[in-house]
């Protein structure tokens, strides 16, 4: 029988954890992303033509929102897990009748909430200041949630395999950061030379950004269905790996 | 009707690379008993306790808590078992009361009744005035109390305490033992590891002594003490003795001013000792005899001597 109450309690605990340091976990990434928008958007607005009839600042807002969602969803699970390991309080959860799946759902659920909260705050500024419109809220919500879930899962994976903060920082700086910056947040991949266009298509983050952008402009670099399929596939792979590790207790019950 | 044991270990093995932390451990703990698990550092006590609580996965073997397997039926076993871990734990994000509420939530426990139980735990463990404090602001003793409250929040039938008095002052140690005794009297099974052997001797009805991942001895505390093949004789002399005959010298375990303590085989008679003392021309003013303490039994077992 599923322990819904236990899973819910853990989900709420994870939300309360990041909310207790909301300046660091929500406001700071919002301000950092708005600075990107200010610098890149304002300076390059008239110099770069990406999609026809669209200002560069309008073009990059969805990309920046998605970048913030991805980074914050990853940060939530990974930092929570590594802190719990370091302080030892993960033991409390491990001693409770919460299954690996319930633990995963609770952690990833909270990561989605944080990712989407940060993304939403940036989006509100984008809508007010840059006259941003949207074509399909459904695609926007779908990509925001699925991408946050995938990154929450990836953060969980990083948290599981990391033994110290240093390992996590390496994963964040050498894997997550490059993949995010090279995912088409600041440009359309059509602006890249041929070979880089092809390489970009091996980056799963590219599909999340592209699909999310489709929700706003109704146009994208690749088919939105391809983006959805890739996002779902990666979410499934990451979830499966996490559940296997949690079930076996790798680096958690050792 | 046959009573299901509180805990059963069936050939439990835990391997860390080359190191065999647990070597096919098999024994059971009766329901309602106060059970002591003793052994030197690295004997495997915490590994066994962690395997029982699901904090580590055994390499092979089975552990059952009240008939439920700790791997297959973990939801049942974790509700039955409460663990006070050896390492101190903190959570910088929540107060003590919030931690207890969250832990209750993991077990699906909420409402007025649970809040009242949390209040009772805080009161009983003298944590009420610190209930809104963060665990990172607490002393080691206070953290230990929080761990006990966390372990009891779901009212487990089996309470496992892994060195709960390590680094705790005398007052708190006494309070903890009083509380533990009370829980035992209420019908809880208590499993305890401690380095304070006199406490284990006073509290535990049955004791397992572990060394190098094996159970070296397992019996009731009384049987362990009476099975010990030595007794201790304290001889007070009218003046200090500097030279002893070999029969006395080899049995001498302690020398202090005019007092000598001999470790004597239970098979050896008092007449024999008196004869040796006479042969040594010692003027005896007093002789007292006592059985071995748990500490002496423990040291004999773990130092490899036959008892």
Image (tube, coloured by chain):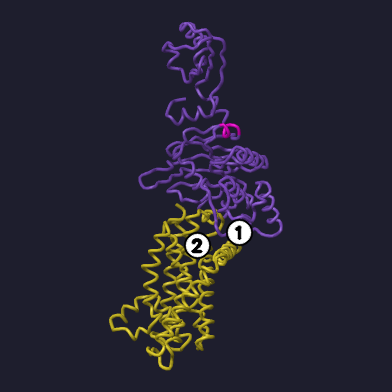
Q: Which residue is mark 1?
A: B102
Quarter of image, res B132? bottom right
Q: Colour of chain B?
A: purple
Residue B199 within the magenta-colored segment of the rendering: yes
The N terminus of chain B - image quarter:
top right
Quarter of image, res A48? bottom left
Work out whether residue A179 or residue B103 is closer to the camera in this orientation and state it: A179
- Distance between the alpha carbons at the discs numbered 2 and 1: 15 Å
In the image: residue B95, left or right of residue B54: right
Work out whether residue A129 or residue B271 is closer to the camera in this orientation and state it: A129
Chain of the residue under the numbered disc 2 shown in the image: A
Q: Which residues are magenta?
A: B198-202
Which residue appears at 53% of the width and 14% of the height?
A: B235
Q: Which residue is mark 2?
A: A80
> Where is residue A105 drawn, in percent x and y?
52, 66
Work out whether residue B98 or residue B62 is closer to the camera in this orientation and state it: B98
**Discs 2 and 1 carry the same chain letter:** no
Residue A161 shows in the view: no
SS of the residue at dot 2? helix
Residue B175 shows in the view: yes
Q: Colour of chain A?
A: yellow
Q: Is the stretch drawn in magenta largely helix, strand or loop?
A: helix
């Amino acid at each position: 029988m599923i322990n819904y109450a236990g899973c819910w309690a853990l989900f709420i605990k994870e939300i309360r954890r990041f909310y207790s340091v909301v300046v660091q976990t929500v406001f700071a990434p919002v301000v950092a992303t708005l600075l990107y928008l200010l610098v890149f958007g304002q300076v390059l607005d008239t110099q770069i033509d990406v999609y026809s009839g669209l200002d560069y600042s309008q073009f990059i807002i969805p990309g920046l929102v998605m970048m913030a969602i991805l980074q914050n969803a990853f940060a939530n699970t990974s930092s929570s897990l590594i802190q719990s390991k370091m302080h030892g309080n993960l033991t409390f959860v491990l001693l409770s009748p919460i299954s690996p799946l319930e633990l995963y759902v609770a952690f990833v659920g909270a990561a989605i909430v944080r990712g989407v909260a940060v993304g939403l705050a940036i989006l509100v500024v984008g809508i007010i200041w840059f006259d941003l419109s949207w074509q399909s809220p459904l695609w926007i919500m779908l990509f925001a949630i699925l991408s946050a879930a995938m990154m929450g899962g990836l953060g969980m994976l990083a948290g599981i395999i990391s033994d110290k903060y240093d390992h996590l920082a390496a994963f964040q700086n050498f894997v997550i950061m490059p993949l995010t910056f090279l995912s088409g947040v600041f440009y359309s991949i059509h602006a890249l030379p041929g070979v880089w266009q092809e390489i970009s298509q091996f980056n799963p983050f590219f599909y999340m950004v592209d699909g999310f952008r489709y929700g706003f402009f109704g146009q994208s670099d690749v088919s939105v269905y391809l983006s959805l399929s890739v996002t779902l596939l990666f979410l499934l792979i990451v979830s499966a790996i996490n559940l296997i590790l949690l079930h076996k207790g790798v680096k958690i019950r050792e | 009707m046959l009573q299901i044991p509180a805990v059963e270990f069936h050939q439990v093995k835990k391997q860390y690379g080359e190191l065999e932390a647990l070597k096919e451990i098999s024994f059971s703990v009766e329901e309602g008993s106060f059970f002591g698990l003793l052994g030197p550092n690295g004997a495997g006590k915490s590994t066994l306790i962690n395997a029982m609580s699901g904090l580590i996965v055994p390499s092979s073997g089975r552990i059952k808590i009240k008939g439920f397997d700790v791997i297959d039926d973990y939801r049942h076993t974790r509700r039955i078992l409460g663990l006070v871990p050896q390492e101190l734990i903190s959570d910088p994000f929540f107060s003590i009361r919030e931690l207890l509420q969250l832990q209750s939530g993991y077990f699906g426990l909420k409402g007025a009744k649970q809040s009242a139980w949390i209040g009772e735990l805080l009161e009983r463990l003298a944590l009420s005035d610190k209930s809104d404090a963060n665990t990172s602001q607490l002393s080691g003793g206070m953290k230990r109390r929080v761990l006990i409250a966390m372990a009891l929040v779901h009212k487990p039938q089996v309470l496992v305490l892994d060195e709960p008095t390590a680094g705790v002052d005398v007052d708190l140690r006494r309070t903890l033992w009083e509380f533990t005794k009370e829980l035992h009297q209420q019908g809880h099974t208590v499993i305890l590891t401690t380095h304070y052997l006199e406490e284990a001797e006073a509290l535990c009805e049955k004791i397992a002594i572990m060394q190098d991942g094996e159970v070296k001895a397992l019996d009731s505390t009384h049987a362990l003490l009476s099975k010990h093949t030595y007794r201790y004789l304290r001889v007070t002399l009218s003046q200090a003795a500097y030279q002893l005959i070999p029969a006395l010298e080899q049995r001498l375990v302690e020398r202090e001013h005019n007092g000598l303590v001999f470790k004597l085989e239970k098979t050896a008679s008092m007449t024999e000792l008196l004869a040796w003392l006479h042969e040594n021309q010692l003027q005896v003013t007093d002789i007292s005899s006592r059985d071995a303490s748990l500490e002496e039994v423990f040291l004999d077992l773990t130092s490899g001597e036959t008892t």
